[in-house]
Amino acid sequence: MPTLPIHDPATGERIDEVAADTADTVARKATAARHAQPAWAAVPMAERLAIGQRFRDGVVRELEPLAVTLTREVGKPITQSRNELNGLLPRLDFFLEQAEAAVREEHVYTGGGMHEEIGHVPLGVVANISAWNYPWFVGCNVIVPALLTGNAVLYKPSELATLTGLAITRLLHEAGVPGDVMACLVGGGEVGAALVAQPIDGLFFTGSHATGERIARSLAGRFVKLQLELGGKDPTYVRADADVKAAAESLADGAMYNTGQSCCSVERIYVHEAVHDAFVEHFLAAVAGFKAGDPMDAGTYIGAITRAAQLDVLEAQVRDAVARGAVLRTGGTRGAGPGNHFPPTVLTNVDHRMALMREESFGPVIGIQRVASDDEAVALMNDTRYGLTAGVFTKDEAAARKVLARVDAGTVYWNCCDRVSPRLPWSGVRDSGMGLTLGVAGIQTFTRPKAWHLRSP
């Protein structure tokens, strides 16, 4: 039986080793899920909701050990791990409050002896290949509404967040979800490929654009519902009338929280020339206050880089930017080992010739570019293959709406950033993906509509 070693990215220490799946075990779990799904779909919604509530209770009951596990395997600062788990609770509440209404029959017409209604039928067997940076958020955005709407779930957590994925699965089983209805698949890319090869009814992936593209090609011609939540190069514009200090402090947090390892982290900042210098000074002051170090220390704000290979990407972006004329204001090189560490890094005098302003950084690195007008800012914000989030800081709501209406992004922010709400759909355009999670539409996405034409005799 193959095994998967688990390492602490903050220290390099091997902390565990777990049994991994093979192509054969993936196929067996997929077959079992197919057989178990109809009976699960027949369970009354009230019972499924009660199971969901027990799962929530389990998260609350074990919150501290779950946070420690998350920190140890992905390097997220312990305070931010607790924040993720606490932030999960209102998402679960939303799913539990809205699921029944979201899939209730819709009666749309009655007349001339004919009645028309729309039903919402579970997709069937849903595959979820999830991410490591927010494994509770990202995983439960799919798993919980999929189960509540009557689907079986084949869940492959990232190999970098395996222990958390196993904990999610265990808590769902303890809450009452049958083992064959909710199966965890352990392993790396080969296990993900084996999952994609199964006769599934939906594939929900969160991760890199490159992997998402491979999955899409693998599913081409199979007519399987596909949702891809991919990357972003998320821009924000600071207008001349903004509260510069408040904007700088908010954007420093938006760029550096979770050590910059978020698809909606602020990755590009455009500042009107009238306030550029003041903004930069406030931004540098805010970043200087972020404590880096041991992720298990409650005071640590900058933790570890989860993937060691990303250190090379970050250093290469900094080198490229400096070679093209950028000014390195702080940081710029990996920290001394052991572990994967990179300090908050800020560059000014940047432009779009630089990889820093075009390709995902996925780390605590940010470029700040001077602009002369709203039009220039909008043009630069749209000069990207991504389209996940975008924001503007200004005291003028009308101006903010005008700017954001012209920006191609699935989510937009006025005087805030790096924010996700369970009440709003989460989606992207272009290379940021297809489909959505969250919101009522993010519950219905795990169903297909069934049209009923009913004529009375």
Image (cartoon, rainbow, N blue to C red):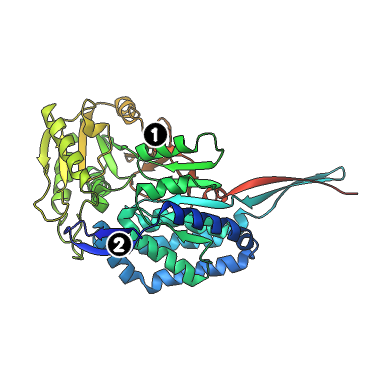
Residue nearest the viewer, comparing 6 with 260 = 6
Label pair 2/1, CB-CB below 8 angstroms: no
**Residue 74 quadrant:** bottom left
In this view of the protein, can residue 443 be seen by the observer?
no
Residue occupied by mark 1: 431
**Image quarter hosting the N terminus:** bottom left
| Residue depicted at x 36% and y 47% | 189
Residue nearest the viewer, comparing 25 with 106 = 25
Q: Position of residue 165 (x, y in %)?
A: 38, 60
Secondary structure beneath dot 2 equals: helix
Q: How many marks?
A: 2
Crowding at dot 2, Cα within 10 Å, few <14 / some 14-19 / many 20+, comes out as many
Residue occupied by mark 2: 70
| Residue depicted at x 43% and y 64% | 169
Q: Position of residue 115 (x, y in %)?
A: 80, 47
Up-down: is 52 above or below 444? Answer: below
Q: Which labelled disc corresponds to residue 353?
A: none
Q: Position of residue 133 (x, y in %)?
A: 32, 52
Up-down: is 82 above or below 325? Answer: below
Spatial CA distance of label 2 from label 1 is 29 Å
Crowding at dot 1, Cα within 10 Å, few <14 / some 14-19 / many 20+, comes out as many
For marks 2 and 1, the one nearer the N-term is 2
| Residue depicted at x 26% and y 53% | 258
Q: Amino acid at mark 2?
A: Leu
User: Relative to residue 40, is residue 288 drawn left or right?
Assistant: left
Secondary structure beneath dot 1 equals: helix
